[in-house]
Image (cartoon, rainbow, N blue to C red):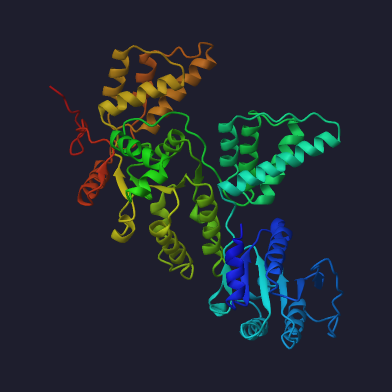
Amino acid sequence: MIDPNQLKNFAQAGLAALLIKTPSADESLIIQEIVQTLQQKSFFDRALQWDAANQFKTIELNGKTETEAPLDVSPQAHPVLTFFHHLESKLELNHPTLIIAKDIWRFIESPEARPDFIRLAIDCFYRLKRSHHRLFILDGTGHIPSHFQDLVWLLPNPLPNSGEIRALIDKKMQSLAQSARLAGVEFPISLTSSEWQQLARICQGLTSEAIEDILQLVALQQFSFTSDALEQVKALKVQRLANSGITFGNPPDVAVKGLSAVQSWADSQLPLLLDPVGRSQYNLQLTKGVLVIGPAGTGKSLFAKTLAQQWNIPLLQLDMGRLMNKHLGGSEANLRGLLEIAEACAPCILWADEIDKQLANSTGENDGGTSARTIAFLLTWLQEHKSDVILVATANRPWNLTAEQLRRFQCFFVDIPDVNARFEIWEALLEKFSISLPTEAVELLAAESEFYTGAEINGIVSECAVNAWVEKHPGQVDVGALLNKLRCRRPQWGGRNQELLELRNWAAASQTIWANPAPQSSSVTQNSRHIEW
């Protein structure tokens, strides 16, 4: 939300053309904030509002309403031409005027816009800086192109913070309770102190209008607001952000196993995450970026999901492909919007799966440099941002990752699981499918599944569990059935030792931390089984 003091300072400093990133649903609220804040200081004698459909309209000041005289222009004239010609006429007047424009930016922001529109805008913005008038432009992108640099300033309008969200919730609940009383409807509100905090936490990342909409919808559906409403609010938030291209990762169906070093790192970070004030006193920093590298199927993505679950924080997905936009600056604007929502949801995890593929396409040779600029923006943000957003990325083949990219991450290498890790994986997956086996059987499965990844073991257990259910004895799977399935499937990495060796050599050369530092029981230089005497 807009900082009133910053709004006053920008206007008083002579920054005549200000761009405010404004969701369409929040336009009326933003206009009200601008007028009320600046009217208190008597910055302006009058205020006008413009949009492409209605042209100029007078905004009420001090309870008085004025009618804006129509400009003598051709009815066939483009609305943008009408806007700038009218604005030019206002610059001749000595009465300080506040102009709020809704739709103009989309016509002049893109480098592909009509040259005459851009030229009119440049000349007008320049003259505005040398006048008593102020122009506020409302737009959903918040992106200032190079041809308007130093002529238009961006006035920050961040999503509501935790304090503002709590105030919004309190105000809305009072309004709902009053509305229910007037309608003669019972509307019990019963949340504990921790549940009120949880509700505010769930609403992070939403606009003010979206928060009100969701609270109102849940209240109408339940005719109450109790702890049962929290999950419904969360589901509506996920649905609302999905409409904007923001997706949340699903919770893990099984805990990640065999990554002891990564788990130790996670345990060391959690106290820092929970006590931001305490860590700031000692200048301690959260790890901003984690890169988990290793063969496919070894639990890298599962680690990101498990970490979010263990820390009880949201998991947002970063898909660079979905952010790409054919218009110049569009991809960066999409990424900027995603990062803004992530920061508003902080603390949270931003999960970039298979980032090596995304970075490999960042040369810019095939898209005019769009991928390169977008990746550069992401890496700069990763280094500079101050929020509790942790970027957790995964990579299968790190060959194309540069030293500059790697230095921004805490890097872990996930090898194919050794016998101890496989034992933990078998145990977890058997429990997942409600299959009970003695410890000796699980040890045998772990010994016999050399070179198998966690994903492959999951597939074997899942298939046997399905067969047991179809055969009317769910959960009753013996070790023989599992061994038969195991021996019928060749492991993905069983005949690819050279690639696995190259991955291990790369990890050793780059000083990457082994996710499971226990000695490996698997040999990568020969196909015979290793015997532990």
Whether residue 456 is visible? yes
Q: Compared to 329, does 188 lie above or below?
A: above
437 on left or right of 521: right
Whether residue 396 is visible? no
Query: Can you give x and y, in whole percent of width and height, for residue 462 in the image?
Result: 46, 24
* Residue 63 picture quarter: bottom right
Query: Can you give x and y, in whole percent of width and height, for residue 176 in the image?
Result: 76, 39
The tally of labels here is 0
292 on left or right of 85: left
Q: Residue at x 18, y 36 (%)?
A: 526
343 or 410, which is in the foreground? 343
48 on left or right of 249: right
* Residue 180 picture quarter: top right
Q: Residue at x 25, y 44 (%)?
A: 513
Quadrant where the N terminus sits is bottom right
Q: Compared to 235, does 134 lie above or below?
A: below
* Residue 195 picture quarter: top right
Q: Residue furthest left?
A: 533
Query: Can you give x and y, in whole percent of width and height, for residue 444 in the image?
Result: 28, 18
